[in-house]
Amino acid sequence: MFHLTHIAMTGLLAAFALVFTPASADAQSADEAEAFVQREAQEVIDALQAFQDGELDAETLKRNFRERVDILADVPRITNFVLGRYRRGADEAQLDEFRTVFREFAINTYERELGNYAGQTLEVTGSVTRGSGDFIVRSTVRANGSGEDVPVNWRVMSGDDGLKVVDAEVLGVWLAQTQREQITGIIGNAGGDVSAATSALRDRIEE
Amino acid sequence: MGHNTKSAGRLAALAVLTGLILGACTTRPESLQANDPFEPLNRAVFDFNLAADQAVIAPVVYTYRGAVPRTGRLGVRNFLRNLNEPVVFANLLLQGRPGDAFATASRFGLNTIVGVGGLFDVASEANIYRREADFGLTLGRWGVESGPYLVLPFLGPSNVRDTVGRFVDRYPHPTYWVEDIRESDAIWVYRGVYAIDVRLQLDETFASLERSAIDPYVQLRSVYRQNRSAALGQQDEFEDLPEFD
């Protein structure tokens, strides 16, 4: 009798563990990450298409696009990432100025880079869970008509505001990683002066 | 006396060369972290390449694009890629990938015979897709490290391992087998057409440098390193990605 109860209890515990282990939570979140990219990245691409179709004026596009980018991407987290080790110990006023200018630069870059994909369809094809709250969502941007399909991977991390994209890989190249290499290089060349990168970004925005 | 003068001259030349190489080195942490100890020299070559591209190469490439219809350009690209299949085949064998090597040999046979000397990629239509391999990647698969980043005149980004690979890959290439081509001006025609096609394929990379680079030199270095890692399959499981916090 005791034996049977013991087996039943063990079975119950095992079932309970299956439902509530972190692995299960990750699996659920990976699905959420996939759904998040499918929905929000497509929204960004659609906003650009509406502009190209003449349904939106440039001013509305810019406003829409910025709102959409903030839903899709964690720009403050990306900003801290691209500063690398120079974030620590830097002057707070300089960091604030950098954050403002980098945000402007990054959104312009996304607009230009994503502009190539306007009118195309994003299809999520799977995901990899790197760790708790850290996912890679694989997708393909299907060229409607001419051109080739482009594989795009999204690094999605959970934070205070839920899931957000922190980096995107197009044709084997990660955007934020590449930006970090350039920005830390400029700051390093200037002896650790963050404002050197702010000036370089400002120059690029004005070009 | 004459012998001594010659030796002294050689020593002086060696000293100048060593000085040049040492002078071209950097000790900046960012450069060393990016495996780019020759950054000053590389930057000079990069600037030269960009100037050459703007002055000569890009205008020639755009003239070619304007003069030859898309179908013709695709035929040229297919032909050049088909000629390179023996190189891919040899490297796949060296990498211990007999299945992929067999598929590549099948592509070469099919495209050469049915695809009119490689002008048409009938193999892809038969779902035998193109594999990519070169001796730089083969060395990488054997565990050889990439070595310092290099920018080669006209050829662009590379590293020590991939530069060695470039030289080795000449030998299994059909243009090397045929003495009439190897020893004649035809080889330069081939190289010219090849260069134009490669530059045309890289047009989006050049445009992206214009569009989004903060420091084009560093962006290209980063893109090259990431592309080669991806080709080596080092990013498949995304284990080496940096921490974000």
Image (spheres, rainbow, N blue to C red):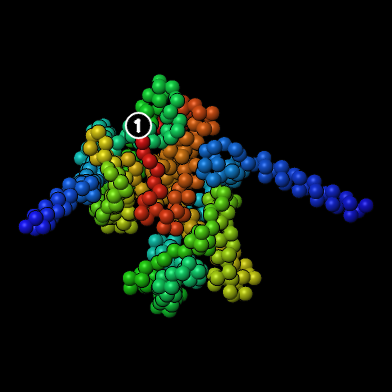
Q: Is residue A25 left or right of residue B132?
A: left
Image quarter in which the C terminus of chain A is found: top left
Asked if residue B112 can be seen in this view, the reply is: yes
Q: Position of residue A137 (x, y in %)?
A: 28, 50
Residue beneath disc 1? A103
Residue at 89% across, 54% down:
B3
User: Furthest-left residue in view?
Assistant: A1
Image quarter in which the N terminus of chain A is found: bottom left
Chain identifier of the residue bearing label 1 in the image: A
Residue B137, above or below A64: below
Q: Position of residue A29 (x, y in %)?
A: 22, 46
Q: Position of residue B1 (x, y in %)?
A: 93, 52
Residue B225, above or below B172: above
Residue at 20% across, 40% down:
A55
Image quadrant assignment for residue B114: bottom left
User: Furthest-right residue in view?
Assistant: B1
For badge 1, the amino acid type reads Arg
Residue A144, above or below B21: below
